Image (spheres, rainbow, N blue to C red):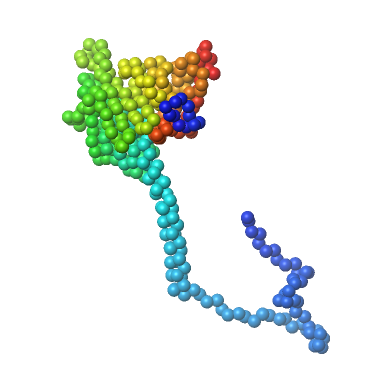
Amino acid sequence: MTLGPQPGWSDETAQADAPADPAVPMRGWASRPLGPSAEAPPNSHTMAVEPEPGPAPVAPSRLQTLSTTGWLLLGTVAVVLAVMTFAIPLWTSARSTPRVVLLGSGSSLSVLIQSGDARVVIAAGNDPAAFGRAFGQATALAGGRIDVLIIGATGQDLAVPVDLTRGNDVRRVVRLGSPHPGRETGDLPPGLPQIPPLARIDVAPGLTATIETLEIPTPNPDLPGDFDLAWRARIRYGAAMVLVLSDAKYAGEFAPLDAHAVLVAASDDDLGALLPGPAGALIVNAEDVDGSEIRSGLPPLLTAEFPTIRVHSGTAVTLLLTDAGAELPLDEVVLIRPMTEGVPT
């Protein structure tokens, strides 16, 4: 399924020789039955004719055994080389395709932006084990390295990024927003650099991620200066755009976009602020949103079936980015219709 600038989607067993019937002599000179010669006098004793013993079987010499083993080894090497000749280029080509991978991380979705060997991760969620399973699924055979880790969370959602900072596979760590009063954790490395409220990351040639960050004040007399951290990432390649929102309820806090895009709600089940909108597909965290909530949140006047994906904790959903648009994994897509007078269609 490909989403481009315009709405739409491409959606013989060999049988063993049977023993000869002894009543039917086999034809051919070598199979003629042996009997008394017509010129010999009759004899009451029949002479049994036995075949002369042939040469004794010769055991294969050590040289012959080594020769056979050598040929087997050469054959195996040839097969392996043939597989590598075709498989490695295909695997390399697949890895070089720009992609956005949504990683089920428990209470939120984390985002892997990848092209070739370049990897940027926006991390959030309360389940490091689930993130590890999803990330391992997305990066199988390619190792667990992360070039840039962006911490996009506060409170319990810091569990995943904190766990990642303890490993040895992260080259650089930055954060979205300033340290949060009361919802910060001392397990984060001190002095992490904070990226600007509007920042653009060039992940690879033609693949960019523009991240907008908002600190939305909340009335909390017990925590002066308390705020909710909200962010939106616009990931572009060619005609493809994936728009990721940290929290669906804050969709209206950002400037509207006219571009056709795949919308991703990393957390929260308030889809009213997210839809209607210029969307080609909707992807949500399955821990927050079920199918009926998506259906009820769709615009009532929507007539076409709408592609949706729910990302479950510990799983990875990959969107391939091409010049024609974003390709959705068809085995994950569910086409739904909005509610009509309370009755799903």
Point out residue 162 in the picture as x, y percentages from the top left corner.
26, 31
Observer-nearest of 273 and 287:
273
Whether residue 322 sits left or right of residue 159 in the image: it is: right
Measuring from the top left, give residue 147's x and y in whole percent.
27, 38
Residue found 27% across the figure and 29% down from its top: 200
Q: Quadrant of residue 168?
A: top left
Task: Pick the residue in front: 295 or 89.
Answer: 89
Is residue 213 visible in the rendered structure shown here? yes
Locate residue 183 relative to residue 41 in the image: left or right.
left
Q: How many numbered markers are drawn?
A: 0
Q: Is residue 138 above or below residue 200?
A: below
Quadrant hosting residue 24: bottom right
Q: Is residue 125 visible to us here?
A: no
Q: x, y (%) of residue 138? A: 38, 38
Residue at x 44%, y 26% (from the top left corner): 6
- Which residue occupies the foreground of this view, 283 or 315? 283
Q: Residue furthest left?
A: 191
Query: Where the C terminus falls, by quadrant?
Result: top right
Side of 27 relative to 278 (left or right)? right
Q: Residue at x 25, y 17 (%)?
A: 227
Say if 280 sits above or below 320 in the image.
above
Residue appearing at x 21%, y 27% in the figure: 194
